[in-house]
């Protein structure tokens, strides 16, 4: 019995007949976004090694439409922050987030990125959610590749179900304003 994750993509609800399919535009856009996310790995320590295993042949994140790692913030959809983030690195991380085009999602991988981990010191940021909004947290020190894939699939589900105009809503703008982002 294989321990690999098998994923199938179901067609969105709609009206279908011979030679046509009609549905809501938001559903089609969400389906396309969810299955073609380009991650930007922002790895600073041991969680980055686990992410490398996730991208390797055994776990193969490319099965989820993410075989193209983007090291340019302007071409990425999902920011995957892995490892310890120092307070000096905080402004750099925020700048990378701001350079990403909307829609953008953030995956906080590991205890250090999520809460500072065991490093309760003056120099370590106690969670990246203090400077940028986070969509999904992956716990662990370091988390296993299966956990990273699970977090990635949660981001896919968010991307699939998110309405195209949510980013223009007053609630979303208020969330960004609470982080000092316009």
Image: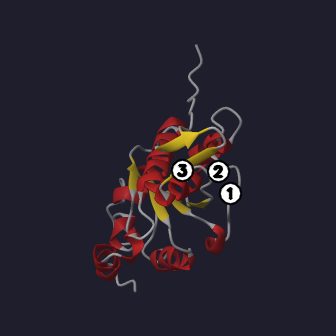
The residue most toward the front is 18
Q: CA distance from mark 2 to mark 1?
A: 7 Å
Judged from the image, the secondary structure of the residue bearing numbered disc 3 is strand
Marks 2/1 in contact by CB < 8 Å: the verdict is: yes
- Image disc number at residue 66: 2
The residue depicted at 56 percent of the width and 79 percent of the height is 99
Q: Is residue 20 left or right of residue 11?
A: right
Judged from the image, the secondary structure of the residue bearing numbered disc 2 is loop
Q: Is residue 68 left or right of residue 29?
A: right
Q: Which residue is mark 3?
A: 22
Q: Residues within 10 Å of mark 1 (few under 14, many from 20)?
A: some
Q: Nearer the viewer, mark 3 or mark 2?
A: 3
Q: Nearer the viewer, mark 3 or mark 1?
A: 3
Q: Quadrant of residue 7?
A: top right
Q: Residues within 10 Å of mark 3 (few under 14, many from 20)?
A: few
Q: Which residue is mark 1?
A: 69
Q: CA distance from mark 3 to mark 2?
A: 27 Å
Q: Quadrant of the C terminus?
A: bottom left
Front-lying residue, 119 or 179: 179
> Can residue 46 be seen here?
no
The residue depicted at 63 percent of the width and 35 percent of the height is 59
Marks 3/1 in contact by CB < 8 Å: the verdict is: no
Q: In the rendered structure, which disc, 3 or 2, sits on the residue that comes first in sequence?
A: 3
Q: Quadrant of the N terminus?
A: top right
Q: Quadrant of residue 167?
A: bottom left
The residue depicted at 33 percent of the width and 65 percent of the height is 126
């Amino acid at each position: 019995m294989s321990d690999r994750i098998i994923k199938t993509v179901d067609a969105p609800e709609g009206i279908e007949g011979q030679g046509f399919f009609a549905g809501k535009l938001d559903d089609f856009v969400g389906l396309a976004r969810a299955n073609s996310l380009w991650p930007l790995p922002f790895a600073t320590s041991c969680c980055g090694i686990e992410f490398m295993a996730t991208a390797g042949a055994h776990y193969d994140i490319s099965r989820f439409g993410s075989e193209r790692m983007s090291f340019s913030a302007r071409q990425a959809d999902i920011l995957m922050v892995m490892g310890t983030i120092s307070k000096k690195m905080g402004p750099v991380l925020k700048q990378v987030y701001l350079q990403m085009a909307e829609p953008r999602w953030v995956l906080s991988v590991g205890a250090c990125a999520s809460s500072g981990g065991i490093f309760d010191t003056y120099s370590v940021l106690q969670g990246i959610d203090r400077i940028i909004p986070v969509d999904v947290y992956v716990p662990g020190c370091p988390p296993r590749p299966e956990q990273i894939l699970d977090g990635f699939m949660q981001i896919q589900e968010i991307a699939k179900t998110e309405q195209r105009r949510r980013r223009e809503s007053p609630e979303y703008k208020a969330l960004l304003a609470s982080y000092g982002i316009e």
